[in-house]
Image: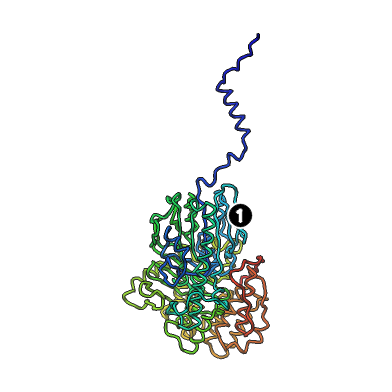
Amino acid sequence: MKQAASTPPFTSSSLMRTLLFWILCLPLTCFVPAWGANQPNFLWLTSEDHGPQMGCYGDRYATTPNIDALAAKGMLFKQCWSNGPVCAAARTTIISGMYPPSTGAEHMRSMVELPQGKKLYPQFLRAAGYYCTNNNKEDYNLTKPKDTWDESSKKAHWKNRGNGQPFFAIFNETCSHESQIRTRPHPQVHDPKGVRVPAYHPDTPEVRQDWAQYYDKVTEADASAGQRLKELEEAGLADETIVFYYADHGSGMPRSKRWPSNSGLHVPLVVYFPPKWRHLAPKEYAAGVQSDRLVSFVDLAPTLLSIIGVKPPDWMQGHAFAGKFQTEPQPYLYGFRGRMDERYDCVRSVTDGRFVYVRNFMPHLSQAQHVAYQMQTPTTKVWKKLFDAGKTTPEQSLFWKEPKAAEELYDLSTDPDEVHNLTDKPEHAQTLLKMRQAQEDWALKIRDIGLLPEGEIHARAEGTTPYDMGHDEQLYPVEKVLAVAGKASSMKMADIEALRAAFEDQDAALRHWAAMGALMRGKAGLDALHKEVKNACFDSSSYVKIPALWTLAKHGAAEERAESMRGLVALADWNHVNVFTAMSALCALGDLGDAVKPMLDDLKKLPKKGPAPDPRYDSYVSRLLSDLTGSEAEFELDATPAPKKTKVSRRKD
């Protein structure tokens, strides 16, 4: 019987061919990287319009059990600033990792272009394989690239990611928004009798109810966060996920929201790193730790990149406080205020954790400029009524006072409500010098283009971006502008000669600040610079004309006042000027009070619509006109998504 041939033994080459055959037959999905194995998930829980009024921050009146528990097993930062004291400015800081005064995005809904070659942090995360969702508010002052989020909507959720894909998910709670403080009727939970009324607010039933209702809303935000944390736990992802909780700026109460002092910028920041990712946590991290490290929203983007092992680019202006590339603590935090809805201002602030320094570049304007939306809060209404009746204390009157101080310095250790200005105290002279220098150094380092009028920013950035314009010394000589802005707003008559020289400068920004300097000094400023102010009324730049006309309309002779008001009305006509000029002129007219009554018929004929960077500018012009003419104002809740963008006219007036 013939034997079957024996199977030849495998050679090394035949073995390799066989293995290769079976490898090629395997499903391709077997070789997709196990995303979650080497990268943590991120859950960011955010809430609107509330400061550190929480139990974990020592507030015994607060009811916030969920975030208190998160802080007990994680850690909190005792001093975190939102940088901007309003939603859009603060969120723009977070998503870009850059200070809005350097990108031109400090003004509400300014919608400026993203700097050339720069990316928003979700774009970095998506490039690293993350599924990035935002639920659901955006409201950035920078235009957002199309590929920013995998999904940004009310339905956005980490559950929709790819199998095993790491996620970055934001859930934003709006129940604590400013608008909810004043919603009536409201089922009161916190007893108004137990609330602490800050020294700057009058102690009235309306104020107590607003504050108590605010605490009720913070409790609701805490409960919402608790539900998200429970959802994560039930999905078995708590051990894989780094959690951040923060609010987008200080409370929605007046003198917090919109004002860049500690009351408007101090926010809670609680972080939790599960044991698996403990090596990526801040160096001081431990359960229940309260960190003294100074952090702010500009630090969040570089911190995210550092945690996932990506070196933050040099152009990011924040400092990572966790991850592979975390830096040493910084000595200061910085804040800013630009245009708030329809009203312009220019304020910068600095803190070292104890002292707060505020630099008012427009001290002729009160903290309480008539922002129509803010005036709807019952506290604001009763506060204004009491101030007008002369029934407020000096501390309560500061909000409404005109002019405000050019510089402010507060010691949080003895004056947490920031109502006792220390700038004239000899024992604090060195601290004042140190903080002033810190603010000036920061402005030069980031090349603060917020020192330009808003319309001037857009005009100079024609063909490029505001940030890139600001980094071109020919287009923006920042040191010269800062120097003249400082002398203009110093309120010192000793700086008059420097302003006289600035009136002759070829750069319109310097001429603008020279005219502002005359305006801010009132009648004395006009008397000292009368010839220069008169000539400035015919300047080629509307941003020089407006403060010059404003000065004459307010402090000039009778015939000068009438003529100057007519000039301002002409510059408020949106049919013939850009929106920035129209708003600036209307703000000037609004400061003149009853003196504008003879111009009411002309004001009522002015257009309320026109070309702008964003449709929401329409309501700003409308509100200014309504305030001047006594007609009904138009409102838009600042928690709503942005309307579709329209093209803006870039008239260089």
The residue closer to the viewer here, 30 or 137, is: 30
The residue closer to the viewer here, 285 or 613, is: 285
The residue closer to the viewer here, 380 or 227, is: 227
Q: Is residue 4 left or right of residue 45?
A: right
Q: Which residue is mark 1?
A: 150
* Residue pictured at 61% horizontal, 68% vertical: 640
Q: Position of residue 42 (x, y in %)?
A: 51, 55
Q: In terms of secondary structure, where does tag 1 sit?
A: loop
Residue 56: name its quadrant: bottom left
Q: Position of residue 592 (x, y in %)?
A: 55, 85
Q: Position of residue 371 (x, y in %)?
A: 56, 78
Q: Is residue 196 above or below residue 641?
A: below
Q: Is residue 591 above or below residue 70?
A: below
Q: Position of residue 583 (x, y in %)?
A: 60, 76
Q: Is residue 338 above or below residue 520?
A: above
Q: Residue furthest top?
A: 1
Q: Amino acid at mark 1?
A: Asp
